[in-house]
Amino acid sequence: MDRKRASKWPALLLGLVILLLGLALMGGGGYLLMQGGSAYYLLAGAGLTLSGATMMARRHGALGLFGLVLLGTTLWAVWEVGFDWWQLVPRVAVLCVIGLIMLLPWWRRGASRSGVMILSLSVLVALGVAVASQVPDLKSGELNGSIAGQAPSTSPNPAQIAAEDWVAYGGTNAGTHYSALDQITPQNISQLEEVWRIQTGDTIQPDSPPEITNQNTPLKVNDLLYICTSHSRAMALDPQSGETVWSFDPEISTMGADDFSRWAHMTCRGVTYYDVASYGENGIDSAPDEQGNIIDAAEAASSHEGDSAPMVSETDVMCPRRIFLPTADARLVALNADTGERCTTFGDNGEIDLTRNMGPIVPGGYYSTSPAVVTRNLVILGGHVTDNSSVDEPSGVIRAFDVRSGELVWNWDSGNPTSTTPLADDEVYTRNSPNVWAPFSVDEELDLVYLPMGNATPDQWGADRSEDDERYSAGLVALDLATGNIAWSYQFVHHDLWDMDSPAQPVLIDLNVDGEVVPSVIQPTKQGSLYVLNRETGEPVVPIDEVPVPQGAVEGDWTAPTQARSQLNLLPPPLRGRDMWGGTPVDQMLCRIKFNSLRYEGQYTPPSLQGSIVYPGNVGVFNWSGIAVDPVRQAIFTTPNYLAFVSRMIPREQVAEGEGSASEQGLQPNEGAPYAVEMGPLLSPLGIPCQAPPWGDVAGVDLAADEGPEVVWRHRNGTTRDSMPFGIPLPLKVGVPALGGPTTTGGGVTFLSGTLDQYIRGYDLTSGEELWKSRLPAGGQATPMTYQGEDGRQYVVVTAGGHGTFGTRMGDYVIAYALPEQ
């Protein structure tokens, strides 16, 4: 091949690329314009097609034509989205790179001087816009209030603060995820180092369900660290070294199935600790002495009433300290916290069968994914129920057992809410009643337990729900501890058709409101509102508005005319066509086409046959990972997510028998309902979200602001390092979703590990600035915790086990960090 002929090939190849890009944009752009969308793609496609054909024909005008398209694209992009770097990238970046290539000698040779000048100017303008559009901060500010070493303006409630130990899932039964420890500060956190790591041996198996997760938050109490694993194994570790002290395997069964592969979930968020001696000054005046004898048992048993009455038994001697372990095959096991042996006098040889009175259960279709909560005399728990499988699922009943004997004391079934008397052996709790799968919180001074309510399944079809289903779903219910009777309830989503159940532990905090201390409860929700209620009465502390919402459900169903929206919220603005995103102009255009083909009228757009966008999606702004609240500084550290989902209703006659699965994505059968539902995230052809980033933030809320609670700062959080297409490890700081909550400390730092990229990070609570991070060997979809060891050091511990459907690397790690020894 001669040199002259060889020199044609670069122009032919580049011209062909531009031509094909132009044809794709022109074809898709024409369809988009017919939908009522932007005319840009049709016009740009025509210009690129002409430029590519001209280059292939070796005509002089190719560079000038391309330059005009690039210049027009840059100006259009700035007009449409402003100087927002991540919004500009899919619109301009590819064309700018092609323009730079065209200015190289191979392609510039033979071009007209005016064409080169036009293209050069266009490239310079595009690069100038890129320089001017560096990633903007979402919101900068600083939280006020006390910092480490300064006395708070009011004395915080000790029930809301973890001290040297971490005794419950949320630090305490108040669920604040706050520790008073202040050894680690913004000034020294950079010195934090890994001090030990273990592997539990509980790894993903060939028959594991699609959503196998390790969301465990360890407990540190009784001079031990207690953990559970995905397959419901419990372990006690040495807090300073991580060495195993004891382990217990409940040997979960497949509940009649061949294996675990068709289960919807398999997870364990935590265990529960109970010590009979810890209530010595709060209602139980007896405890074992060094010889195991009960001191003043008779006097204590006759001096209290109700829930505070200490029913001292042989169990107090045999298991004065115990761990309650929920298992994936629907049992509650009581273990001696010192030895890991069964507390044989609890229930039946140390366990309770939670399938009792539940009726038929599909394997994996009912069990407690979240830890139970304990009070003076009760261990209380609810359970996960598989979403969208059928209209005949197990009850969402809440049960309270005697913490010593395992005897059922009361049950509250939202399908039969006025009767809390335990059922007879041959009776069955109300099928399909709304459940509670997230952790509970308890205020033992008020004798109330707080339930974040789920929904009656299926989620997107509600025509057959009962009056009680409608009243108690997707809200917060407070029950009397002694009786299980309703003290008050407040609903956040009326006739929920979007899976907006209350997903996180309610947070109990005493708020300073206009100079008065108000006992409050904060409920994070998927829809983005942080509902703040008086925890005694259920009345709003922060105003809640009933806002009009879109109407028009599928045939046979209906929609509520309004929905409750807290004035304290992190709700994103409604989506627009220009908010659609992608890696290139082509997949961004395809996302815009998809957006226009779906029904979307803002938040609470009803499910439809054509498909409806759910935004925020059912993963939520907030999910099970919740929030961290500093009761001293009256501040919240939050991790809001922003992902759009699509739900499409499918008439029953179009669904083959047995089609669908228990997974939370894809076709879900809704057996017994007139519609199945197909669900999944709104993604581009490259598998990235169709809406523009950020998809995950960190945010700080000042609860004591003069004009009421306000969001003070917001920052993009996390990178794409572990979630780029084709496994490219490119750490773009776009802000990625997080499943795994924050923990805040008295030192003014917050720890978080739940992002899609595999890091645990430390932040300055005052400003939200990222101060430190450490690479994890697997996904950290769990909430870190902190405690003080016997050596006087403050430790931070996180579980790194991954998350099946979230797509992070699976593992079986528990890792501890501390400052260097002095």
Image (cartoon, helix red, strand yellow):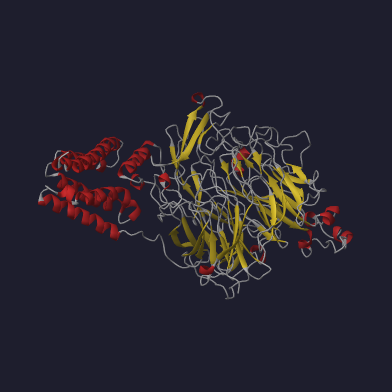
Please report the residue visible at 74 percent of the width from the left and 44 percent of the height from the top: 420
Q: Quadrant of residue 179?
A: bottom right
Between 502 and 128, which is closer to the camera in this rendering?
Answer: 128
Q: Quadrant of residue 392?
A: top right
Which residue occupies the extreme front position in the image?
A: 1
Q: How many marks do you count on the picture?
A: 0
Q: Is residue 565 above or below residue 773?
A: above
Left or right: 86 with respect to 95? right
Q: Is residue 746 above or below residue 265?
A: below
* Visible residue check, residue 311: no
Quarter the N terminus occupies? top left
Left or right: 35 with respect to 549? left
Between 434 and 697, which is closer to the camera in this rendering?
Answer: 697
Q: Position of residue 803 (x, y in %)?
A: 55, 47
Please report the residue visible at 80 percent of the width from the left and 52 percent of the height from the top: 404
Between 167 and 207, which is closer to the camera in this rendering?
Answer: 207
Quarter the C terminus occupies? bottom right
Left or right: 234 with respect to 664? right
Q: Position of residue 621 (x, y in %)?
A: 49, 50
* Visible residue check, residue 50: yes
Q: Position of residue 287 (x, y in %)?
A: 83, 61
Q: Position of residue 331 (x, y in %)?
A: 72, 43
